[in-house]
Amino acid sequence: MMDFAWIIDTFFIIVAFVLIILMVPGFAMLEAGLVRTKNVTTVLTINTIIYITASLIFFLWGYNIAFGEWNDSSISKYAAFLFQMAFVGKTVNIVSGGVSERLKIIPLGIFSIIMAGLIYPLVVNWTWGYNIFQNTLFDISNLHDLAGSTVIHSTGGWALLAASLIIGPRKGRYLKKGRIKVIPASNIPLVMLGAFLLWIGWFGFNGGSVGSISSKKAAETVSLVILNTNNAGLAGGFIVAVLNYLKYKKFDITMILNGSLGGLVAITAGADVVTPYEALLIGIVGGILVFFGVPFFDKLKIDDPVGALSVHLINGIWGTIAAGIFAENVSLIAQIKGMVIVGVFTFTISYILIYFINKIIPFRIKEDEEIEGLDVNECGMEAYPEFKRTI
């Protein structure tokens, strides 16, 4: 009977791993659709390099920093590694999407190594891992973060904020007298495809984080987590659609999808400890935060082509707090403490490292290269060579 449970849970984790890997093309398609055609190949290349680099580094030493030895008696140790490896690249995906259209590949690759090999493993160590700060002031092991509202999403969001402040906005994005130049998405079908690949992947992301499905109780928890995950995504998209129509009398599909993604990020911390109706409320607030967060960052002249700061950073914070508000056995104080410590650590070390990398190998392409497009200068090929494009 024990072997049967081991086999079922191992298979469950492998399936969850495969679903999470669907988020790799999810991020790639979402970003490729939201940037201009002259930068699409570069976005796809960056997403590919992030998956390859981050996964290799996590295999070589990142996992050991986070969890220590490869031991897991409840499932195959190889399946346990694969599941955790699937998470690591997402933190860098958040960074790359938010600074799209002005970023060189090589310095981002260097930062990917640091994120996968040091920053992310240390955050995991303090929260999900063996915790080098146990029983100290910096012990945040009481943080309830099922699948990473803080550990993954706001970690990536804080690193993105640091990168955005150093790299600066795209050329021509912010005009005189506070005016903002709208840079439209190049391929709306790709945006929708990417968002739904992410949505589907989230079922493995959150559901797999339960860790087991071989008992009646575990299967019930997995089912609740997936229902709550879906509910939050539905609610986030719905409220943004309503707000968008009330304010602009239009339905902006890119904002609606980002509203859903914001809801999905928000429920990621507490999907196992809230009710389906509470998940709807968490998703609604998540969508509202996206709707008002996108213009808020534009007012600060922090250029974010894909809305990653609103989706991942703001909703990573909200989702962590929401678990403390709605769940009976989750401490709100512990949630806030964990969120703050991770935020301060990640932003500070990311800012310092990006600043010094930028001094040696500038993250930003030259102005004339930005006008021409990254595809020609970084990759030597364009995604749509037969189409006449505009700057």
Image (cartoon, rainbow, N blue to C red):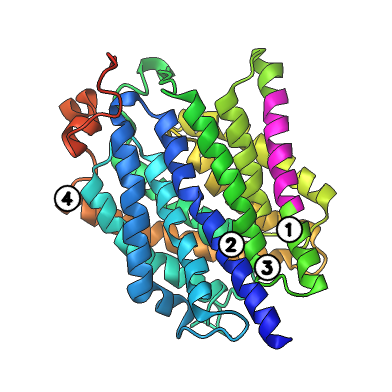
Residue 361 percent coordinates (x, y): 17, 50
Calculate the distance from the C-alpha at mark 3 to the C-alpha at mark 4. 41 Å
- Camera-near label (3 vs 2) is 2
Calculate the distance from the C-alpha at mark 1 to the C-alpha at mark 2. 16 Å
Residue 80 percent coordinates (x, y): 53, 74
Residue tagged 2: 15
Tell me whether the residue at label 3 lies in contact with that at label 2, contact meaning CB atoms closer than 8 angstroms: no
How would you classify the magenta stretch by its main secondary structure? helix
What mark, if any, has residue 225 been given in the picture? 1
Q: Amino acid at mark 4?
A: Ile
Q: Nearer the viewer, residue 88 or 222?
A: 222
Per the rendered image, the range of residues in magenta is: 227-242
Residue tagged 4: 361
Q: Is residue 137 above or below residue 90?
A: below
Tell me whether the residue at label 3 lies in contact with that at label 4, contact meaning CB atoms closer than 8 angstroms: no
**Quarter of the image holding residue 333?**
bottom right
Calculate the distance from the C-alpha at mark 3 to the C-alpha at mark 2. 13 Å
Q: Amino acid at mark 3?
A: Val
Tell me whether the residue at label 1 lies in contact with that at label 3, contact meaning CB atoms closer than 8 angstroms: yes
Residue 238 is a magenta residue: yes
Residue 314 is a magenta residue: no
